Image (tube, rainbow, N blue to C red):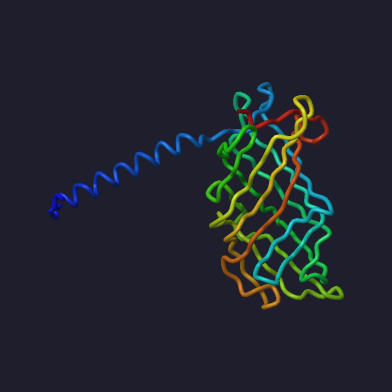
Amino acid sequence: MECLTGQNMSKAFGLAMMALVAFGAIAAQGASAIPLTVDNSLSKVFITGTTDSPSVHTLTVEPGLAVECTHALYRGEAEVKSGAVNEISLTPEYTGCKAFGFATAHVKHNGCIFTLTTPVKIGEGEVTWNKDQIHVVCSEGKRIEITPTSFGVSVCTAFVGSQTPSAGHLVARNEGTSTEMTLTDEATVEGVTYTSTGPACGKGGNTAKFIGNTTATCFSNGLHTVKTNCTFSS
């Protein structure tokens, strides 16, 4: 067996690293970005996403400390270029919320939005936004506020500001028919950073986790009354 000298070992290591980089580039090419496709006569598309009971949206700040909302509404708009949408911004609204299984919870978005950049195709009519493509965007000094109350009195408040979560993903799929298409998405977003005014809302940090499923419909007008098809094409 040939014995490798230090110089040969360094060269072999360098070649191995080059091979790994090349393999990674090939793998990345295989998982191509894919925009949302809509009618190419549109300059904007408007999106409504909803979740209703029995499905819930859940934000868990720490084990045993969770806020569950039975109704979620996301409304937003996106620029269309040649029938393609590369970035979606949505304003969230949560109602019917409970904290710790008993306390009423109030969620105020304060103008903060969720922005999704171009997703990656993972199957026929199926895409995923990875952690680097999911963003919470708030104006300076603004944050999402989650406030549990007991007998009308605030227990504490958790704040979620502008950030890109450090883990998780959101998967979306085409649903319906070619003439009545909707999108479903399943979100599991982790590593969400938050702060808190009291221990009942957790001690703060990047431990928060968000889970929720949503059905989205696209519209051609700002009133969200005229439906238009939107798909993640093949």
Q: Residue at x 87, y 75 (%)?
A: 151
Q: Position of residue 196 (x, y in %)?
A: 65, 72
53 relative to 144 in the view: left or right:
right
Q: Residue furthest right?
A: 151
Q: Position of residue 148 (x, y in %)?
A: 77, 70
Quadrant including the C terminus:
top right
Q: Nearer the viewer, residue 85 or 21?
A: 21
18 relative to 155 in the view: left or right:
left
Q: Residue furthest bottom?
A: 199
Q: Residue furthest front?
A: 1
**Numbered-mark total:** 0
- The vertical placement of 148 against 184, above or below, is below
Q: Nearer the viewer, residue 152 or 85?
A: 85
Examine the image and state in which quarter residue 76 appears.
Answer: top right
Q: Residue furthest top?
A: 41
Q: Residue at x 61, y 44 (%)?
A: 116
Q: Residue at x 14, y 55 (%)?
A: 6
Q: Position of residue 55 (x, y in %)?
A: 80, 53
Q: Residue at x 34, y 44 (%)?
A: 20
Q: Nearer the viewer, residue 74 or 17?
A: 17
